[in-house]
Image: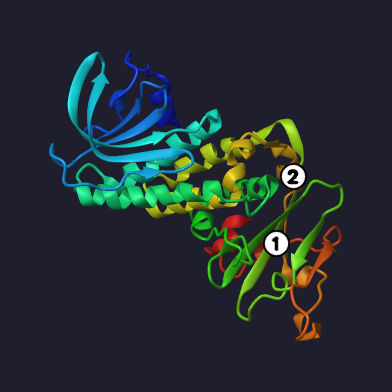
Amino acid sequence: MDRIIQLFRSLSAPGVKEGNIFSAIKINKSGNFRVGISPDKMPSLLFASASDKSVGTVGNIILRNITVIFDAKCSIIDNNRTEEGFFTIIKFIGENELLVNHFLRSAEVLTSSLGNRYTNEQIKREIYKFVELFTSLSEPPIKTAQGLWAELFVIERSSNSRKLVAAWHATPEDKFDFNAGNERVEVKSTSKDKRSHRFSIIQLNPPEGTRVMIASLFARRSAGGRSIERLISDIQPSLAGDVEMLRNFFFVINQTLGNSISDSLSITFDYEVAKESVAFYAIKNIPRIMSEYIPAEVSAVSFEVDLSAAKQLDHNDIEDKNGLIAATL
């Protein structure tokens, strides 16, 4: 969370040139988790080993933006006192300042999953899961920054952000942005003046028994708007303590932005325009091509629809008052 960022900003790099020496401060009461700064001024997460002896050789990890060294002997400087011990080090090695913040915010996934007491095997297992969150940052993005901003906006303004994050998906196979089984929500945004969006045939012809709602909004770039990073920061406290929820939250963000994340986190859109323009529609009220009229030999059908005259959805139309659609409205 932002608390970890603030703790990191309070640290000064140790006055040595190299080695596993860190200025660090405790994140939790037990002191098992610390945020530190290395001699080369890089942020690092330090997790105390379950014992003061190495439990065997484990292959270290090197990714585009982070490295992991398991069970390393370290010198920790905390408040002018030096302590030695074995720690697993997760070190950020990128250069983008916003990505530093993103890395430190993601640390809550680990601190929540490990708790105050753990074994060395648990450390390794949870760190491997944590590292998986960052593997997609070397891959091409699967959506635009505008698309992600719109989805984050919908989560942030919802009445139950946990319900939306639990249903959030970001793979090419997913036809809807939020999928909770029989209820699904698709977010559409446009930077143009007309409320017109492109739909795939399945988005407006979902499987029988499912209820689908379309959220539509205007997303306009604005220097004084809210950034993707700001929306992430605003949403994260509502997910506190739920490991799987936090993991899915950062997984979808990283998967969506991929190797464009460094440039995308700072992109800002006009929050007030989005707030005033957001509207919701049941698919029965949206002009569409019915799937039965598409020849079996024709595939990958998509079409543009102008929603300007479509009837909007309100709470009285919702069947499940505790479901995904109700939480989104």
Q: Residue at x 63, y 78 (%)?
A: 207
| Quarter of image, res 34 | top left
Give residue 214's mark.
1
Q: Are marks 1 and 2 in contact (CB under 8 Å)?
A: no
Dot 2 crowding, Cα within 10 Å, few <14, some 14–19, many 20+: many
* Left or right: 60 as drawn, with respect to 284: left
Circle 2 SS class: loop
Q: CA distance from mark 1 to mark 2?
A: 15 Å
Q: Nearer the viewer, mark 1 or mark 2?
A: 2
- Label placed on residue 110: none
User: Relative to 75, does residue 153 appear above or below in the rendering?
Assistant: below
Residue at x 20%, y 40% (from the top left corner): 49
Q: Residue 249: give x, y in percent of width and height.
A: 49, 50
User: In the visual, does 264 lie left or right of 18?
Assistant: right
Residue tagged 2 = 219
User: On the picture, is 279 further left or further right than 105?
Assistant: right
